[in-house]
Amino acid sequence: MSSGDGSRGSASTYPSGTRYSLNLEEGISVPAASISSSLQCIPYQKLTDLKFINKGAYGTVHSACHSDWRVRVAVKFFPTERHLVESERNKILKEAEILHKARFSYILPILGICNEPECLGIVTEYMTNGSLNQLLHENAPRVEIVWPLAFRILYEIALGVNFLHNLTPSLLHHDLKTQNILLDRDFHAKIADFGLSKWRMLSSSHSYSDQSTPGGTIIYMPPEEYEPSSARNRRGSVKHDMYSFAIIMWEVLARKQPYEGATTPMQIMFSVSKGNRPDLSEESLPSEIPHRDLFISLMQSGWATDPNDRPAFIKCLLELEPIIRNYDEILILEGILQIKKMKTNFQHNSISNFPTMPCVNLLEQPAANSSNENVNIRKSEEYVIPQCSSVLNKEWNVCPRTEPVKIENEDISLVTSPTRCLKSSIPYSVIPAIPCGIMHPEFTERQSARPTWEMSDPVQESPFSALQWILLKRHEIINQMTEACLNQCLDALISRMVILKEDYELIKSKQTRSSKVRQLIDTCDSQGEIFARVIVQKLRENRQNDLQPFPEI
């Protein structure tokens, strides 16, 4: 097991006498002379074989192969719809420069920055085992996590955050959650997305001065951060991260999402403000969990309502160290091997169980009867991938490019109906079929639970959840949703108490219909399935039939 002695953290100190402010509230103040050139600029052309991984509130994440280094990396691209002026771009670059120096065994290393006129991205190491959230909650397959491995992950998270807090000045994460805990090939924890306060603020706000939305995810956010005005006037605190870590501890031990019964963020906020926390009974935390009483004590102190009652991370480490020393590393390695075997067997069975059904090759035989009359595919034709198209990112597994992509003499089949191809993660339309080998596992595994493809009328329903469907149909919805439908969506969201006042006002403040719809979808992405179902229902009721098939809700 890694020792966590910080051997890789030797370059973590900042120039003496220089103070940086990197927490969410204060932003960043950096003397220009103190910024060195240690952060490598990586040309976009060097990032090949780009594949979509995820989309969040602060941009899209892709994996890529660095053509010179010959290793896979991860790239987080700033949302291109949010235009950056030079001063804003420089603030992000300076912020990334400082984070590059914060090297430690349990911190995701920043390798460089992709700073192009058309795009801005941070390049990091690629974590092959995804996020802690995926490990805990993915059902395809649901893996068994041995207790020694679970405890090691928690211990390494505490080591990483404690390291950030002990820098001079402290680096505060303020968005700590299982989605931001990544796992390397040996399932060691790597903390990601720390210290990017300027990135978050600029990517999520419609103006530079708009900082009203508190950072972090509601589930992991301490109650003192719920009020935007007080959060703006309060100095950043390490106690915020301790609250988030306590929630993560519960999530790892219970293998459940906190506050599963809540349907809206406001319900969670109201409940937590009243003093409620995740369930500590044996129904959620069985009595057979080793060291159960110790973990419950750490959680209760960590999510205390009064920030001053929460312990420092060093106290958690002192409590966890004897537990970690108690387990033989062989037990952890055996648990890791079992997880890898389950995933390998699952992927093998998913591929081998695919029935063979014909796909139509429209390069050889154009689909004259296709309902999509506007699609005209020919050999050697240029296909321009629009900049920052989230739909195309997911369908083509490529990063946005500005130059056209030529397809010459390739055997590219196209799907003309949902009955032509199997287990597709692409909505029913005439689009290129992606070979299974380059599809990201997140998308291929979503449909793996269905043993055979169910033949269905494409105008009836889609196999996606409402949120997945909206994200895949993003550009079509932006183009086609009417002003009346948009207003009905907002009215329904308000009446069902699914939308926050700040989000509603942000949507209404946009100047054009398309920008309002775009902001609505961005808000939907962060609020989840219930929010998405309201939008789908209103699209159905307003007969926006060009968006069919709608998902079943």
Image: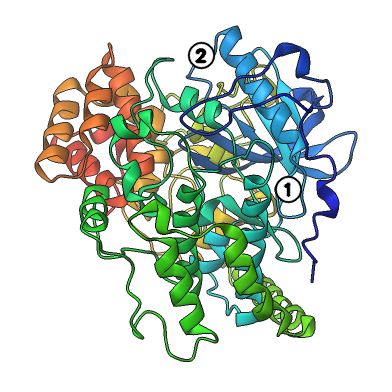
Q: Percent position (x, y) of residue 185?
A: 75, 62
- Does dot 1 land on a helix, a strand or a loop? loop
Q: Percent position (x, y) of residue 51?
A: 66, 41
> Tag 1 or tag 2, which sits nearer the N-term?
2
Q: Nearer the viewer, residue 508 or 25?
A: 25
Q: Which residue is mark 1?
A: 126
Residue found farthest to the left = 495
Determine the residue positioned at 49% across, 45% down: 175
In which quadrant of the rendered image does the C terminus lie? bottom left
Q: Nearer the viewer, residue 487 or 23?
A: 23
Determine the residue positioned at 40% across, 15% down: 207
Residue 387 vertical placement versus 368 (above, below)? above
Residue 350 vertical placement versus 99 (above, below)? below
Q: Give left or right: position of 498 versus 491.
A: right
Q: Give left or right: position of 425 versus 86.
A: left
- Does dot 2 land on a helix, a strand or a loop? loop
* Residue 408 in sight: no
Q: So how many labels did they put on this image?
A: 2
Q: Percent position (x, y) of residue 440?
A: 62, 51
Q: Percent position (x, y) of residue 278?
A: 34, 68
